[in-house]
Image (cartoon, grey):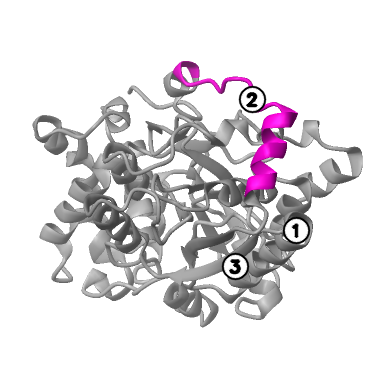
Amino acid sequence: MNKTPLYCALALTLHLPALATTSAADWSSIESEARGQTVYFNAWGGSDVINRYIEWAAERVEQESGVAVELVKISDAAAVVTRIAAEVGAGNVDAGTVDLIWVNGENFKRLKQDGLLAESWARDLPNADLVDYQLPVTTDFSIPTDGQESPWGGAQLTFIYHPQRLAQTPQDAQGFLQLARDYPGMLAYPRVPDFHATSFLKQLLIELTDEDSALYKPVSESNFEAVTAPLWRYLDQLHPLLWREARAFPQGIAQMHSLFADGELLMSLSFNPNDAANLVRSGTLPEGVRSFGFKRGMLGNIHFVAIPSNAPAKSGAKVFANFLLSPEAQLRKADLDVWGDPSVLDATKLGRDQAETLQSRDVAALPADTPWLAEPHASWVEPLERAWLERYGDGR
């Protein structure tokens, strides 16, 4: 079987980062221009923890650089992308309402292909030299970032369990299916198109298909059925064994966490490898929970910030993006008592104390040696969700 390596090796080979080209004088000019600007940062606003972190970062940047950052809380990045497209389409090429956006995947794909992003800038940030380029930071769902996005955090699909209730965790998709047979009604995943549900489908698809190299190229009608057929055969076996026999699905991971905490499910799911540790701290999950991944690896990706082509405060946006890559900001973000979002920095490029802090791992978190599986090409998301809904959307 032709299986993908840890990341998309070909993509990393073809899109190795160039050396930073912004000189100290150039960056000083950007900082001078940025002073006094207001950056409207559009970011998912569904988490108080994340909102507080962004507000802290905004305060630090205003103190240090004189750049005001206004957090615009959004629930759907796609709607913001549509707004940017409408502004540019109406001739607004330099006075848009968005200066910086938290984005990746399908939304980045649309912004890039429609020419709605500021051109190569991210690699020129001074702190970009601290990034760990062994992580998949130069592609976003198999689409080259070409310096149009700056990474600021990592994420990886993670299973959460309690050793007292589950002594042996499954090592692959077939093991997961056997566990469902052994404990009928006690496993679940959210309902598609929930982000975590789609991620779970991609995790299974990468493992089950014999043609997974096709997943890292644009989807086509000619190969979609053949590539995904093993996934549907698998789900046809799995669904009757799931919670409520898959006649209903959890509406999101919050409900999954609740069902898990109440003992109704054996496991929960997250896309943050530190989530179990965070949930214990908040009292959502009991002490003793642990995280695990499949032996071959778990789906992982990087989240980015991008500057729209019509952003009026591009320099201010660059200054803020650069701060988000600073050791101070990255270490605070990774702190479980602050957010617990994994860093994108290379520990070998930091001081000893910073490196030790960055490499520390809570016992409840996903083990650090869990391999990453690269995200399929962004074009697979929509047809995959549509096919799932056609087959199982009525709760079958």
Dot 3 corresponds to which residue?
50
Q: Element under label 3?
A: helix
Q: In this view, does 364 lie to the left or right of 308?
A: right
Name the amino acid type tagged 1: Arg
In this rendering, position of residue 83 left or right of residue 101: left
Q: Residue at x 74, y 68 (%)?
A: 337
Residue 186 sits above or below residue 23 on the image? below
Q: How much space separates mark 3 and mark 1, taking CA atoms?
A: 11 Å
The residue at which mark 2 appears reads as: 20
The reply to whether residue 182 is in sight is yes
Q: Residue at the location (78% across, 52% down)?
A: 328
Q: Residue visible at 26% across and 41% down?
A: 114
Please provide percent x and percent y for residue 268.
Answer: 48, 66
- What range is drawn magenta here? 13-33
Residue 153 seen in the current view:
no
Spatial separation of the CA atoms under disc 2 and disc 3: 29 Å
Disc 2 packing (10 Å; few <14; some 14–19; many ≥20): some
